[in-house]
Image (cartoon, coloured by chain):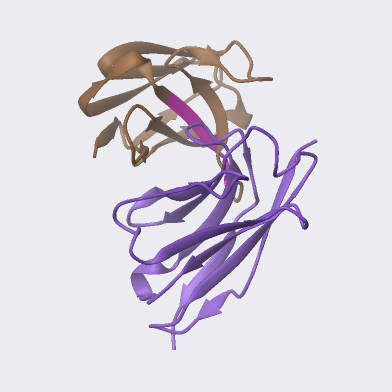
Amino acid sequence: EIVLTQSPGTLSLSPGERATLSCRASQSVTSSYLAWYQQKPGQAPRLLIYGAFSRATGIPDRFSGSGSGTDFTLAISRLEPEDLAVYYCQQYDRSPQTFGQGTKVEIK
Amino acid sequence: QVQLQESGPGLVKPSGTLSLTCAVSGDSISSTNWWSWVRQTPGKGLEWIGEIYHSGSTNYSPSLKSRVTISVDKSQNQFSLKLTSVTAADTAVYYCARGQQLFDYWGQGTLVTVSS
């Protein structure tokens, strides 16, 4: 199965700053079948990005995805306090779909 | 508004069977969507368990396939998960979700603890 490795483990930034989260796959993810989820404390994950760069319904344009092959990035411009969460990448190119271990975003 | 709600025992004995149900509202279980189970543990993170279509077609994670059964009840608009021969490693928050590859709606999750 495809293993996804996310970095950094934790990101601590101030409101208004830009966050850059990385997701690296153990094998190439063809057709950019890569998604990002946001999980706030005590909540279920929420779909943010699919197809590597397409925003899900209702997701603000502060969130953007990029990348291809084995390297993908989630960027959050202009961090807001409500962005405090753990962010997971997921590949759905090959079964079983797998998730990364998550990057925690802390707001200073 | 699509909503999913998990229900079932929060405590299961080792070697027993974990049984959960997911009630769906705001969408028909017979729509063109697949319906999935995902679990989350502190150690392994998010793990896809399996999925079902209203026709009864299923797909399971290879690592759990020998112990998992997912079924659908169209009359109740719900689907269910059974996991047999559980151990402490199956202690997790179990989520039901809509989707086959992408999960756009999730239940709030239910903690299942395996302990005697």
Residue with the most extreme bottom position: B116
Label the magenta part by its dominant secondary structure.
Answer: strand
Q: Residue at x 52, y 69 (%)?
A: B112
| Chain A image colour | brown
For the magenta stretch, what is the residue range?
A35-41
Residue with the most extreme front position: B55
Residue B36 in magenta?
Answer: no
Q: Residue at x 34, y 59 (%)?
A: B64
Measured along the vertical axis of the image, is residue A92 above or below residue B49? above
Q: Residue at x 55, y 20 (%)?
A: A79
The quadrant where residue A24 appears: top left
| Chain B image colour | purple
Q: Residue at x 51, y 36 (%)?
A: B100
The quadrant where residue B97 appears: top right
Residue A93 locus on image (x, y percent)? 34, 26
Seen from the viewer's position, the closer of residues A105 and A67 is A67
Seen from the viewer's position, the closer of residues B58 and B96 is B58
